[in-house]
Amino acid sequence: MDVVRTNVSRLNGEIEVETEAGVGTRVTLKLPLTVVISDALLVRVGEEVLAVPQPAIRRILALDGPEVERVGGAEFIEVGGEWLDFLRLDELLGISARPVGRKTAAVVLRAGGRSLVVTVDELLHKEEIVIKGLGAFLDGVGPFSGTTTSADGRLILVLDPSRLRDAPRPAPEARTTRALRPVGGAVVLLVDDSVSVRKVVGGMLARAGFAVHTAIDGADALEQLGEREVDLVITDLELPRINGYELIEAMRRRPATRDVPVIVLTSRVGDKHVRAVRRLGVSHHVAKPVNELTFVRLVTSLTGRAENGAR
Amino acid sequence: MSRPPFSRDGRGGESRAAAALRAHVVFTVGGVAFAFDAAHARYVLRGDSRGFEASVRFLDCPYPVVDLRRVFRHPAPAHAGFVVLVESGARAGLHVDDLRGLSRIDLDRLTPLPAVYRGPERRWIAGLATTDDGVLVVVRIAELLETLLADELGAGR
């Protein structure tokens, strides 16, 4: 279902799942009739102009500040008798905060079956936009689904409400720090027979400052582990020659790699697979596709290099 | 009378009012298209099955060759690619996957990298440009060379 959601999201659509105990589950896919041209609201956040797909917008709010409630690390706001997630877009995107006390606009967005509220500095105008792909460089960077081009030729990123919903909230004490910090060159071995996964996941880790080596299967990984020290292994389960389970077992047998932390990155997320991985002593079972911020944070925490970053 | 598309310093045709419109060399590494000011390009070498030496000479000057796939941590390419000799303060040969030729880029219309992009390469990326073929990552070649020569060549080459 993650794969379906990702692809629906790329088409600026949304997916809703409703389950009623003892009755069944209804899965609703909503897709725009045309996937290339869409109406969008252009907004400004700090110095950045972003496009919000019009079909995802429920309503616009003007905020004066005190309406937001904080519960733990999350913020909520009441809209029409409903408490919704409240996201400060400038903080989420690592953009300099607006001057304190300034009036803020907020956009209520549909994100899957839920709604959320995001703050923006300025509502610019509505525009019909042509949406293009993010391209290899920007793919996986931030909660965006595509790009469009402004009338003067500049690139505008298109917000993806579903990715916004899933993006990790910056902790209050970390709000002025960087969302992704360089990590002082921790070495990661990424094992996957898919060149796309190696490229995309490897790219996001490299951008975060990790030294990434890749292996195409378990045998290749074991060979590399015999030649170099690594701080973390990220592996798929289904691999040619030596699969992910066998790779982890072999690593646990070798003194040099026994204690190297492992993340299993797979589309096999059923209980059977999760239990089998746990039996091998691996507790980090991540479903494809990954959320960049969440995944980089997990890798950072397991490599213990967070404090080496430019905090 | 015909006019050459680019003058010697890489700027657009002389009638072009916007001085920011400059010719850029477009190359790809790992599926990403990059561009740098053509005024800093010196020569292009095509690779063969033997690959490239660690350093090449051009007009009696040494150009240390830097494999950008290795720098960007991509797997080795399926073909030898090209080496673009560049000079901007320092000299280097950039080993790239492919060359797409020249493109005119308006430097006044570059889009800054989104703030959420936190890779250390921010320092040598001037911004993003859009073309009919997609997004171009526009490189500050002097800063890139400085980084490469410090990180890559200083690491025992």
Image (tube, rainbow, N blue to C red):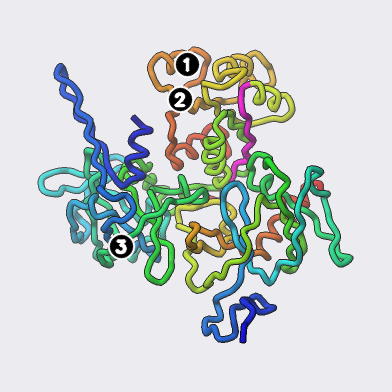
Q: Position of residue A267 (x, y in %)?
A: 43, 26
- The type of residue carrying mark 3 is Val
Is residue A308 among the parts visible in the rendering? no
Q: Residue at x 33, y 36 (%)?
A: A5
Instruction: Check the residue under mark 1 and report the chain it is in.
Output: A
- Provide the residue designation for mark 1: A278
Question: What secondary structure is marked by label 1?
Answer: helix
Question: To which residue does mark 3 refer?
Answer: A43
Earlier sequence position, callout 2 versus callout 1: 1
Residue A286 versus residue A55 in the image, above or below? above
Residue furthest left as drawn? A81
Q: Pointer 2: what residue?
A: A285
In the figure, residue B58 lies in which quadrant?
Answer: bottom right
Answer yes or no: do the residues labelled 1 and 3 have beta carbons within 8 Å? no
Q: Which residues are magenta?
A: A209-218
Dividing the picture into quadrants, the one containing residue A112 is top left
Please, is residue B33 above or below residue A115 in the view? below
